[in-house]
Image (cartoon, grey):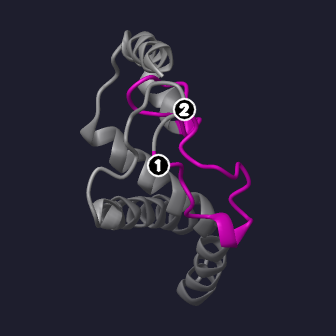
Amino acid sequence: MKKLWAILGMKCPRCYEGKLYTDPNPFHLTNLHIMPKHCDQCGQDFSPEPGFYIGAMYVSYGLCVGMFLFLFFLAEVFYEVSGVVFIAGYTLLLIVLFPYIFRYSRVAYIHLFYEYKADAKAKFQAEKHLKAGKE
């Protein structure tokens, strides 16, 4: 359940505390994709390799298809909406939800590859303290 809250809150997959995006507003489209390089709480690398988030396109596709099937079922069974009206409405919905779909697909994708570590934040803070003491 904590993992689900971390995904919905767009938090770090390692510590569930650090923010994955620098700008909290997804509708600032110029900052939509900007993520810090590392988690400020536990030091987790948010871009482990070049092209890592290309795989998030598959997550985005799955979200869109799942949403399409669910809404199509509702529209067909309960409201008997024509196909053309449904497709037009669904297209408009996707345009409006694009920033959220983009961000949540990236968040879900990185959460697939990293697991929560309860001591990640404490270890990172201790290492940071050691580095500061040596300088």
Residue 45, by quadrant, is top left
Residue 27 is inside the magenta segment: yes
Question: Which of the image's four quarters has the N terminus?
Answer: top left
Say if residue 1 shows up in the picture: no
Q: Residue at x 47, y 34 (%)?
A: 12
Q: Nearer the viewer, residue 50 or 9?
A: 50
- Judged from the image, the secondary structure of the residue bearing numbered disc 2 is loop
Residues drawn in magenta = 8-37
Q: Position of residue 23 (x, y in %)?
A: 69, 52
Q: Residue at x 68, y 71 (%)?
A: 29
Q: Nearer the viewer, residue 45 or 102?
A: 45
Q: Residue at x 46, y 30 (%)?
A: 4
Per the rendering, the mark at residue 40 is 2
Q: Tell me: 18 left or right of 38.
A: right
Q: Tell me: 89 left or right of 28.
A: left
Q: Nearer the viewer, residue 113 or 61?
A: 113
In this picture, is 68 found above or below 39? below
Q: Which residue is mark 1?
A: 37
Q: Residue at x 48, y 60 (%)?
A: 67
Q: Position of residue 30 (x, y in %)?
A: 68, 72
The kind of secondary structure the magenta stretch mainly shows is loop
In this picture, is 112 found above or below 94? above
Per the rendering, the mark at residue 114 is none
